[in-house]
């Protein structure tokens, strides 16, 4: 698969364990996520790009993996991801020059055809 697929898979069981330990809290977070990421004035694709930029600025590897995957699934293009990451670079400077390429690689990994 690839690094970011592995990262998302590695987080799967600990996430399930925590969700089981705090079901009401996790349920609230899940409802917030669903509401915030649903199509509205902004399509989900754009919201995933925003989330990916925030993941870069916050240096969150799991968030990069999850939102790169979701951006690919929502139909974001490589050009859209690149431009969004340019905004992260503008707003976060040096750290985004490290995390932005990671996010770009994650998107490319998830956007890659399954047989590719």
Image (cartoon, rainbow, N blue to C red):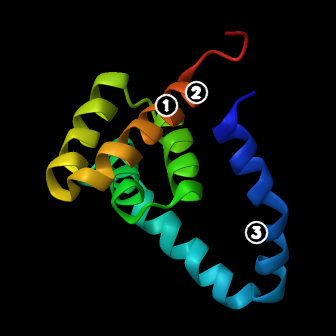
Give the labeled residue for mark 3: 15
Sequence order check: which comes first, mark 3 or mark 2? 3
Frontmost residue, 95 versus 33: 95
Residue 18's disc is none
Sequence order check: which comes first, mark 1 or mark 3? 3
Give the labeled residue for mark 2: 109
What residue do we see at 50% from left, 25% from top? 108
The answer to whether mark 1 and mark 2 are in CB contact below 8 A is: yes
Kindly indicate the quadrant of the structure image that contains residue 115.
top right
What residue do we see at 30% from left, 50% from top? 96
| Residue 20, position as x, y percentages in the image | 84, 81
What residue do we see at 57% from left, 78% from top? 29
- Classify 101 as above or below 87: above
* Circle 3 crowding by C-alpha within 10 Å: few under 14, some 14–19, many from 20: few
| Residue 44, position as x, y percentages in the image | 39, 47
Under circle 3, the secondary element is: helix
Judge depth for marks 1 and 3 and give the one in front.
1
The answer to whether mark 1 and mark 3 are in CB contact below 8 A is: no
Give the labeled residue for mark 1: 105
Between the residue at mark 1 and the residue at mark 2, the CA separation in whole angstroms equals 6 Å
């Amino acid at each position: 698969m690839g690094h970011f697929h592995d990262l998302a898979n590695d987080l799967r069981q600990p996430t399930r364990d925590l969700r089981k330990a705090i079901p009401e809290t996790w349920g609230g977070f899940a409802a917030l996520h669903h509401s915030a990421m649903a199509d509205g004035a902004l399509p989900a694709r754009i919201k995933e790009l925003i989330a990916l930029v925030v993941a870069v600025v916050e240096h969150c590897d799991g968030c990069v993996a999850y939102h790169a995957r979701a951006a690919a699934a929502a139909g974001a293009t490589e050009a859209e991801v690149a431009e969004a990451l340019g905004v992260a670079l503008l707003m976060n400077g040096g750290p985004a020059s490290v995390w932005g390429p990671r996010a770009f690689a994650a998107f490319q990994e998830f956007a890659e055809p399954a047989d590719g």
